[in-house]
Image (tube, rainbow, N blue to C red):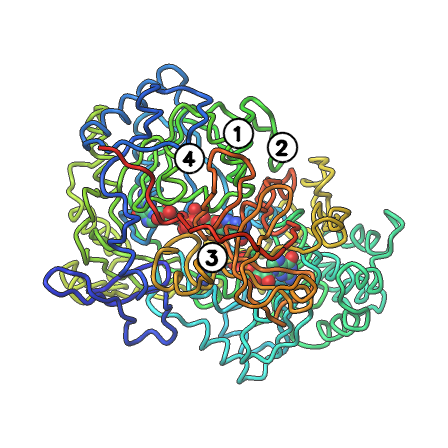
Amino acid sequence: MSVATHWGSFVAVVDSGRLVRIEPTSDDPSPSPIGPGMVTAADDSARVLRPAVRKGWLNGLPRAHDTARGEDAFVEVSWDDALTMVGDELRRVRSQHGDSAVFGGSYGWASAGAFHNAQGQLHRFLALGGGYTDSRNTYSTAALEVILPHVIGGHPWSYQSRMPMWDEIAENCELVVAFGGLALKNSQINPGGLARHQTQDLQRRCRAAGVRFVNVSPIRSDVAGFLDAEWLPVVPNTDTAAMLGIAHTMLVNGWHDEDFLRRCCVGFDRFASYLLGELDGVTKDAAWAARITGISRDTLTDLARRLTTQRSLIMVNYAVQRADHGEQPIWMSVVLAAMAGSMGRPGCGWGAGYATMDATGVAPGRPSVATIPAVSNPVLDFIPVARIADTLLHPGRTIDYDGHRLTLPELRLVYWCGGNPFHHHQDLHRLARAWQRPDTVVVHEAWWNTTAKFADIVLPVATGLERDDFAAGFSDPHLVAMPRVREPEGESRTDHQIFAALAARLGYEKEFTQSRSEIEWVRHLYEQTRDQLGDEAALPSFEDFWSSSTAELPALTGPFPGSFEALRSDPRRFPLPTPSGRIEIFSEEINSFGYDDCAGHPTWFEPVEWLHADRADRFPLHLISNQPASRLHSQYDNGGHSLGSKIRGREPVTLNPSDAGSRGIETGMIVRVYNDRGSCLAGAVLSDDLMPGVVQLSTGAWWDPVRPGLSGTMDRHGNPNVLTADRPCSRLSQGPSALSALVEVELYEDPLPDVLAFTPPNLEH
Ligand SMILES: Nc1nc2c(c(=O)[nH]1)N[C@H]1C(S)=C(S)[C@@H](COP(=O)(O)OP(=O)(O)OC[C@H]3O[C@@H](n4cnc5c(=O)[nH]c(N)nc54)[C@H](O)[C@@H]3O)O[C@H]1N2
Ligand SMILES: Nc1nc2c(c(=O)[nH]1)N[C@H]1C(S)=C(S)[C@@H](COP(=O)(O)OP(=O)(O)OC[C@H]3O[C@@H](n4cnc5c(=O)[nH]c(N)nc54)[C@H](O)[C@@H]3O)O[C@H]1N2
Ligand SMILES: [Mo]
């Protein structure tokens, strides 16, 4: 039976109804090792087996400003009682405080599946019940999503079909400069599923075709060894300065593509004044950039020459924008590609997110697939996704967002389904304080992770292995059947079953379920997809699809709207969907917002936290909290593959040998990573792949606070978000800036505490 996950498709080996193994499919050239490790987690002791209610909530009735979330014991209750409590509480909050007091923003990746999509199910349920406060944008790319529509226009994600695909790069491009690299570890993942991992083979094809790669990143291994990339270690968060130095060099030497800038862009002259220092007295030349970035003047000058004399492609990853002023490197990378003369030439120009997801750069998209139908939300309030702690702490406060003024709503009931805020949010101690504010927190989870432990009502949910569905990954032109391969553990139910039962209590079951059973929904969505595509696609019948496991959708072919090739050929006939119809090097619109942290053109703003900040006197190391190689975020941290990567039970932290040596740290030792926001234990690994002054600790180790109720308490396990800052990129995007954090590391010499991250809370019956 096939298994579809965000990390690829697998085959389940089932013996007498018991899931024995999960194996790679025979046609996946680079299967992810995360898959096989799922088996042991499926019935481990961290599973939530029955509905559970926090003791203090049960005894004290709903009350604001409770201080015991995260520390209390839980009482197991029947489904009937749990559903009555959730239904009554939703009704009470809606009638006393209005529908916007219900927070359904509930960010998170959940699991693959077109029907059992956790966010889709939650939003449909809450919208039919009166509405909810939503969240906008993602933790992945909030800054990119807000800035790009101003610069190149169109839907925030439309660049994925407008940038060159890997095969075009292999064929046409000579030089790739990748800001933030092209980490293969990240291409294990594709949101919603993936039939076959192709990025590695496609990268190899580029190398074989002679494409040269330059890795501008603090970490050498952000580009695969087989690409023989040149490594330019860069001071974290200074990519904008590096690009400005290159741009200045192009300008003063007359190497830039004046024709393209004049015909297809607006505002180059004002930007050129900025480069030349006419606006602020600072010349952004290569020497200036070298002092900031640590990349030599000669290297930057050479890059300017190569980018303009060779067929070149500028790539940016997502991490560079998950930082203070994260909008700037994205904007500036587009401007640099426009100057280089490569924009709109086959296989060249500009693109973002290559290798951050497997299908990115592999296929330009796929035909749309029917999913659980959305219902429009009667509540219009929303918050920028990463402003959740601000909202809980400061209801009524107004903030800027992309030219708007937003008033943060007062949230009384937080409903989380399919995400793990106690993994994904920055400054977890601040989040824990904010989390004490609402009257009630309801969480659907399969495991007793930190978010479940910080909830009032925990409803046990069936995993992606325990329900029938089909997967349709982002940009991946395959549908993959997902028959259940094991029964739901304990008393778990699917999100859909839970919402259907709640909707019945609240009087709108029929509207919610449309009187279909789950398998009828799955069939319905498949058939709807088949009908939408018509004869051309000729998808098999549902029965054939279900027994053969996959179906292929027709490939999408360009040209896609907003194409840079079309723009280059004739900007009048093929304008971009921006206010000017051209690439906006200067944006009148952004300029009109009058923000002091995002100007009308790409600008170098000093990050709040970086290696040249005063704060570096006390916390001299820049923390790179990047995506984990061993799992997807916090998912399956309790799985075999992730557990196998730990050092004495802690998350590995990588240091350069010089930084480790001066602190008496050797590989395998346990260290304490800290700053004035928090501290965590981690297991040291030494590597020359990291530039000095930088430490790397992946996200996703389940937060394991020694005293959950005590702010600043040590984390025994290694979650970097006890160290990161809950600070928006800027007033424009309000995005998260996880990658702008300074820390210090010391040897941990006290007796080692046990890791209790995977241990359920005290449960009473
Ligand atoms: N410091 C730092 N922090 C970061 C980042 C960083 O680079 N640095 N990266 C950020 C990024 S890019 C992202 S996308 C976020 C990711 O943050 P999240 O998406 O919140 O992380 P996940 O671990 O994927 O959380 C998914 C949760 O849903 C549960 N789940 C899975 N399937 C289902 C289901 O079907 N139903 C229900 N109810 N639950 C389910 C899982 O058990 C898990 O707890 O993290 C962000 N946080
Ligand atoms: N295995 C695995 N793959 C994943 C995920 C996962 O959890 N696990 N998550 C997926 C998700 S949700 C997302 S959004 C993408 C994220 O994709 P990215 O954001 O691109 O991935 P990261 O691993 O966070 O960062 C990649 C590299 O960027 C470099 N970097 C960090 N800061 C800077 C900087 O200031 N300048 C430069 N030049 N480089 C910098 C770091 O060295 C880091 O290793 O990955 C996806 N892929
Ligand atoms: Mo992400």
The label on residue 70 is: 4
Question: Secondary structure under badge 2?
Answer: strand
Q: Are marks 3 and 1 in contact (CB under 8 Å)?
A: no
Q: Residue at x 67, y 40 (%)?
A: 589
Whole-Å distance between the Cαs marked 2 and 4? 32 Å
Q: Is residue 679 above or below residue 503?
A: below
Please name the amino acid that badge 1 sits on.
Thr
Q: Which residue is mark 3?
A: 650
The circle on residue 535 is none
Residue 400's mark?
2
In the current view of this chain or complex, which residue is farthest to the top?
A: 96
Q: CA distance from mark 2 to mark 3?
A: 39 Å
Residue 179 appears at what percent x and percent y? Answer: 63, 64
- Indicate left or right for 536 with 363 as reference: left
The disc label shown at residue 391, or none = 1
Q: Where does the image place residue 350, in percent across and percent down from the top left?
A: 61, 64
Q: Give whichever of 686, 272 is nearer the camera.
A: 686
Q: Nearer the viewer, mark 3 or mark 1?
A: 3
Q: Using the image as rendered, state which of residue 738 and residue 136 is in the foreground.
A: 738
CA gap, disc 3 and disc 1 = 32 Å
> What's the residue at 19%, 61% (across, down)?
19
